[in-house]
Image (tube, helix red, strand yellow):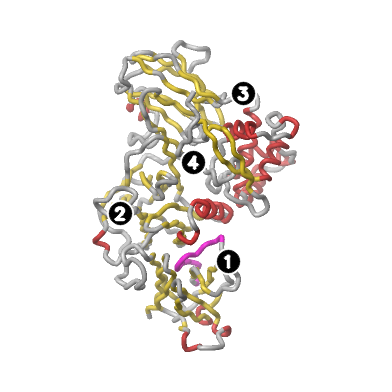
């Protein structure tokens, strides 16, 4: 068994151990500390985790075999957390997840209703993703109460040429590896000869399969770009015999690593792995345990990119009823980094608009993460956006873009999650509906407009723009209901299309919709920063000459960054 040690994985210690959400309106996070397995690499060490008081109460009620007598010990919580391993599920999965689980957990007359009505009822639960994830955890914890405790074990010495016999067990509709044997056990399903490499396919939960060759993996539908598996190189083991360390949760094998040589271990945060047209944009050599964050870009209404300094550090895909998930997204980042250093850039998509290209901008000749990678997107309507600062001289940077050919579009984007030591996205990749063309062009060029004089002209200011129409309505985003200095504005045009300027955040206050004909705006400056202020014309009593009317047609541009905000009107 590996010795007690502190790893660098950090699987969401700032979020609830069970429902995976960072905060709740009514229930506080309670801190727990003690010896436990890391929920990513399964090393043992003294760790601090948080659990909602609400989640603890629910687990005590619905998992009596685990929490006997209603008492909750740290050891019980750790074991239950490993078995649950909650997945941060994408919006829209509640109807599929709850159909089976809620009927088992709660006494409801759903079985007497027509299936289409049941599905409609469950669809409304998508606005409560915490409940979705917690229900998943309850079911897993209850099932695992009858299995042995989690543990590390060491295999016997293995040699190239030996045959491994594999057993599997089904969970959540998927087959997971349950055992590895050198002699045929009862009900073994697959055998593989040990060759030069052992390929391990793993998802968010456990090991799905083992392969002796890449060709075998590709035959089984696993992409050849190593997107879905990691390898143990048996040739470089330094001896004729190899020993593996295996972590079992008592039911499935979660981790398989070589005892003698270091190997990279890969997992995903979703069941929906990328499709066949998968490409990498920005890679760096992985080391140790790597967790990929997957973003499904199909049928989204917009994107929010989180910016820290001069780098993109997070992405969020907006869908109907995703407000709770967005609050958890922003809360998780605010727990890791000072909120004053974070910028959230919202790029709404128009009706029928799709992401047509994705690019990464970075400083050439500089190592990651000081090369400041920034994600850019272009859409099917020829609109572009950069989730990072807009440089005045774009020749200082290099660009790499992927465009699906013909009328193809980007289906998903994935990347390595930022760590404590590296606040940036790396190993960025995409999957597309069609094969992609790779270019070295800047897909989101600037407007050749001067940025404010404060700060760096290359990496100090983020840029957004919007056009104006006679019937455009505006919602002002601010930290409170007083709507003085605002962080951004959301514009809605007569056809329903929306555009955003500055920082529009749905975890902040959004005013009622104002007609642009009734709005005035001004730029200002305090001792610390620039600011933008919107008001209704009727609310301005003094110094009306310092305010500007918004034209019924034209363009608005907005600069935002650590030194504040500034708006410009182009008539």
The secondary structure that dominates the magenta segment is loop
Mark 2 or mark 4: name the one nearer the start of the chain: 4
Image position, residue 303 (x, y; %) = 46, 57
Give the secondary structure at mark 2. Answer: strand
Q: Which mark is residue 147?
A: 3
Q: Are marks 4 and 3 in contact (CB under 8 Å)?
A: no
Q: Earlier in the sequence, mark 3 or mark 2?
A: 3
What is the number of the mark on residue 475? none
Q: How would you rate the neighbour count of disc 2 (Cα within 10 Å): few for under 14, some for 14-19, many for 20 or more?
A: many
> What residue sits right under mark 4 in the picture?
10
**Residue at x-position 45% and y-position 71%:** 528
Residue 509 — which label?
Answer: 1
The residue at the point 72 percent across, 34 percent down is 71
Q: Earlier in the sequence, mark 4 or mark 3?
A: 4
Which region of the structure is painted magenta?
A: 494-507
Q: Nearer the viewer, mark 1 or mark 4?
A: 4
Q: Residue placed at 67% from the left, 50% from the top?
A: 27
Comes first in the chain, label 1 or label 2: 2
Location of residue 321 with respect to 285 vertically, above or below: below
């Amino acid at each position: 068994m590996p010795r007690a040690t502190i790893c660098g994985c950090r699987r969401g210690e700032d979020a609830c151990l069970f429902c995976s959400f960072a905060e709740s309106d009514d229930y506080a996070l309670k801190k727990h500390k003690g010896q436990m397995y890391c929920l990513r690499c399964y090393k043992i060490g003294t760790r601090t985790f948080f659990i909602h008081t609400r989640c603890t109460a629910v687990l005590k009620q619905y998992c009596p075999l685990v929490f006997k007598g209603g008492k909750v010990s740290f050891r019980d919580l750790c074991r239950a957390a490993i078995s649950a391993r909650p997945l941060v599920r994408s919006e829209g999965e509640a109807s599929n997840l709850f159909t089976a689980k809620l009927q088992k957990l709660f006494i409801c007359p759903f079985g007497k209703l027509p299936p289409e009505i049941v599905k409609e009822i469950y669809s409304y639960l998508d606005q409560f993703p915490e409940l979705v994830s917690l229900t998943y955890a309850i079911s897993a914890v209850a099932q695992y109460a009858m299995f042995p405790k989690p543990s590390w074990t060491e295999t016997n010495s293995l040699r190239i040429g030996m045959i491994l016999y594999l057993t599997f067990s089904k969970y959540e509709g998927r087959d997971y590896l349950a055992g590895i044997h050198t002699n045929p056990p009862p009900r073994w399903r697959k055998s593989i000869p040990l060759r030069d490499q052992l390929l391990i396919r793993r998802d968010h939960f456990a090991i799905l399969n083992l392969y002796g060759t890449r060709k075998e993996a590709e035959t089984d539908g696993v992409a050849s770009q190593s997107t879905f598996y990691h390898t143990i190189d048996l040739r470089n083991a330094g001896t004729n015999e190899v020993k593996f360390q295996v972590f079992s949760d008592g039911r499935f094998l979660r981790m398989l690593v070589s005892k003698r040589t270091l190997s990279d271990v890969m997992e995903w945060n979703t069941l929906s792995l990328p499709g066949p047209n998968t490409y990498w944009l920005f890679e760096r050599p992985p080391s140790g345990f790597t967790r990929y964050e997957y973003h499904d870009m199909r049928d989204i209404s917009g994107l929010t990119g989180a910016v820290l300094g001069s780098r993109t550090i997070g992405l969020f895909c907006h869908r109907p009823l995703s407000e709770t998930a967005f609050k958890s997204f922003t809360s998780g980042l605010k727990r890791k980094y000072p909120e004053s250093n974070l910028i959230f850039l919202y790029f709404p998509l128009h009706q029928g608009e799709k992401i047509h290209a994705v690019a990464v901008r970075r400083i050439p000749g500089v190592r990651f993460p000081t090369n400041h990678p920034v994600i850019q997107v272009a859409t099917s309507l020829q609109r572009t956006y950069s989730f990072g600062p807009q440089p005045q001289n774009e020749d200082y940077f290099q660009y790499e873009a992927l465009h699906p050919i013909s009328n193809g579009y980007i289906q998903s984007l994935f990347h390595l999650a930022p760590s404590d030591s590296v606040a940036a996205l790396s190993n960025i990749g995409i999957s597309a509906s069609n094969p992609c063309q790779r270019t070295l062009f800047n897909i989101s060029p600037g407007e050749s407009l001067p940025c404010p004089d404060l700060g760096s002209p290359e990496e100090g200011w983020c840029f957004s723009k919007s056009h104006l129409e006679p019937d455009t309505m505006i919602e002002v985003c601010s930290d409170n209901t007083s709507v003085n200095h605002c962080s951004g504005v959301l514009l809605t045009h007569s056809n329903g299309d929306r555009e955003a300027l500055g920082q529009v955040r749905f975890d902040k206050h959004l005013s009622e919709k104002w007609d642009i004909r009734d709005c005035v705006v001004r730029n200002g400056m305090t001792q610390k920063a620039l600011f933008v202020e919107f008001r209704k014309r009727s609310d301005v009593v003094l110094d009306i000459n310092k305010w500007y009317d918004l034209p019924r047609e034209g363009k608005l541009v907005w600069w935002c960054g650590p030194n504040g905000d500034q708006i410009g009107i182009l008539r």
